[in-house]
Image: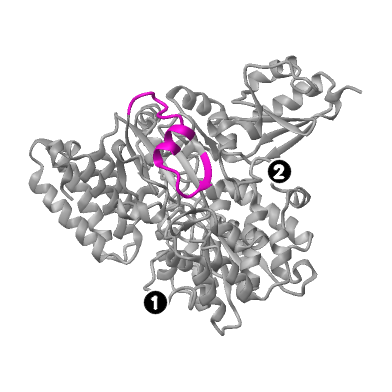
Amino acid sequence: MSSAASATIFVPRDSGALSLGADSVAAAIAAEASRRGIAVKLIRTGSRGLYWLEPMVEVEIAGVRLAYGPVGSADVPSLFESGFLSASPGGHPLALGPAEKIPGIARQHRIVFARAGVTDPLSVDDYLAHGGFRGLARALAMPGAAIVGEVARANLRGRGGAAFPAGIKWKTTLEQADQTKYVVCNADEGDSGTFADRMLMEGDPLLLIEGMTIAGLAIGAAQGFIYLRSEYPHALRTLTAVIAAAEARGYLGNNVCGSGRAFNLDVVVGAGAYICGEETAMLESLEGKRGMVRYKPPVPAVAGLFGRPSVINNVLTFASVPAIIEHGGEAYNQLGVGRSRGTIPLQLAGNVARPGLVEVSFGLSLRELIYDFGGGTRSGRPLRAVQVGGPLGAYFPAAMLDLKIDYEAFAEAGGLLGHGGVVVFDDTVDLARMARYAMEFCAIESCGKCTPCRIGSTRGAELLDRVIDNRAGGGAELDLLRELCDTMAAGSLCALGGLTPMPVMSALRHFPEDFGLPAAAAARP
Amino acid sequence: MDSSETWNKDAVAAIVDSLRHAPGALLRILRRVQDDLGWIPPPALPLIAHGLNLSRAEVHGVASFYHDFRHTPPARNVIRLCRAESCQALGAEALARHVRGRLGVGFGETTSDREFALEAVYCLGNCACSPAGVINGQLLGRLTPKTFDDALESLVRR
């Protein structure tokens, strides 16, 4: 028997890989194998997040997964020619060696993304074989307060952007007397430059389901909702299929793992509104209404979805929970720096040579992230600016790249870490135009509740048009811009109006020359 | 809107009937009508309002709030280009200029023969493969004017 007869080949079906032709690569592999009379087992996985190598194909030989990438369908015949399925592959220009040893992966500390790109996301058995549902098994034997206690001990903070301690949120909900409570997952990953939620939902969705189920056990909720943005149709298909698989195996439903406890999950798809990533606007949308921001208090932990106490967390927050319950909160708390504990999945995008997902303990510097992991700019031109934290995050100049990935360090530097998106720009970027874009985006996505956001964003875009048209004498307009940003920051209920000034003012502060001011004005706050 | 546009009233009534008791029914119903019909015909709104015992104003308010909901019939081919920061950092504006020239329409516009509509989208979650776009539901990454044209050629509905 030739070793090729039992070859297992892995091709991602992550939507990023699909956008680069992964389906045609998989089809070409199946066709070429059949033409050569070779039996292969083709498994579709998520992505490991090394997007510059996608579509990345892996072959398991003697328990080791050897990677090739980026593979186009035209490369497939030559892969077979090189003997990539044999016990001793002959070598191929696209060969990357063992997938686990690719430098971009080997230096990461993967807790949430340990299985993404490795397993078949739809297979409960694969999930179990790779350590899945161990956190749930422990949680089923624990009282709710003990589960909440572990999450608090881990110092897990919300990964959606606000970084609020999950333990406090869960404890508040647990303490409510209401018989009906909800677990709500915010999967409205609207921040540009971020894609970790999508990758997880497509690559290891059972981890999210396990985390949400543990949350249900902790606070006494029998129903969970995943609010998913409509831009993620592949994630919807994966979630729908895997929820059905989990129900069939008794991991979801009215008798979770035979415990007598109920937990059911429902996916609700949004309709294209960035504001619905704000938790109270999301609740309104889940209730079938316009996605308008609510006043707080009451906080959702007290009166959330349909007026009931609700734990609302981001995909990555829930996905961090199973490991915390399995290994204890203290083990998780050992990782990180300052008040930022554990690991954070960072998303490296924009003009960078090696874009993708980088999960590391807090404390890495932006420079290490962009150069050691990212390989510098893709264009090869000098890096000029980095925007961290999505469309409401600050623009930082190259001189500030020693900033550490840490919530407090970013706040001190006049920025935010947000959902962990890092977008790199080379020296062709025009920061006045990026500032204008921030205002335009706010105008498009404002829910309209607060006047400074609804009207101020439109006026801000007009103001920046004038600044751009007349960079020689922009002084007076810039004072007006500063005043407008003050008003928006102070007079808006939520982060959209409140934080749109952050990209605008950071661009002005760090790149005054793009606004028609002398570079020496950089010191002005 | 062309007054001769027809829409399937029975299909909408069936959707309302199947989802009227679901939590947050209105958004789910509008979502399903949009997905199944490709748009939300304005005359469907009173029907939905009646089914949910809501006012027409409430239903109109929700239907007009969300960017996904179309109020006119869709073009035969829908092209969406991401205009957010990561894609901008890798030439999304130059790509957009090319696409506008190629299709002869701007963002938010439909060709007069209703063959092509061009829409702006703000992040497709494909930022690691910027610039990104969608042609008739197919997500595309690392787009250049050339690869866009090739993809359009293979994905266009004639």
The Cα–Cα distance between marks 2 and 1, rounded to whole angstroms, is: 42 Å
Of A344 and A36, nearer the camera is A344
The dot on residue A119 is 2
Amino acid type, mark 1? Pro
Quarter-of-image position of residue A66: top right
> Residue A141: x and y, percent?
73, 71
Look at the image and give the residue range highlighted in magenta. Answer: A357-382
Please report the residue visible at 37 percent of the width from the left and 30 percent of the height from the top.
B91
**Badge 1 is on which residue?**
A297
Above-or-below relation of A71 to A429: above
Apparent side of residue A322 relative to residue B153 in the rendered image (left or right): right
The residue type indicated by label 2 comes to Thr
Q: Is residue A93 left or right of residue A42?
A: left
Say few, some or many: other residues with alpha carbon within 10 Å of mark 2 (under 14 / 14 to 19 / 20 or more).
many
Relative placement, left or right, of A479 versus A36 is left
Q: Dot 1: within a 10 Å radius of its alpha carbon, few (fewer than 14), some, or many (20 or more) residues?
A: few
The percent position of residue A202, horizontal first and vertical second, equals: 62, 47
| Among numbered discs 2 and 1, the one appearing first in the sequence | 2
Name above or below for residue A362 compared with residue B142.
below
Residue B1 vs residue A246: left or right?
Answer: left
Q: Position of residue A19 (x, y in %)?
A: 56, 34
Chain assignment, label 2: A
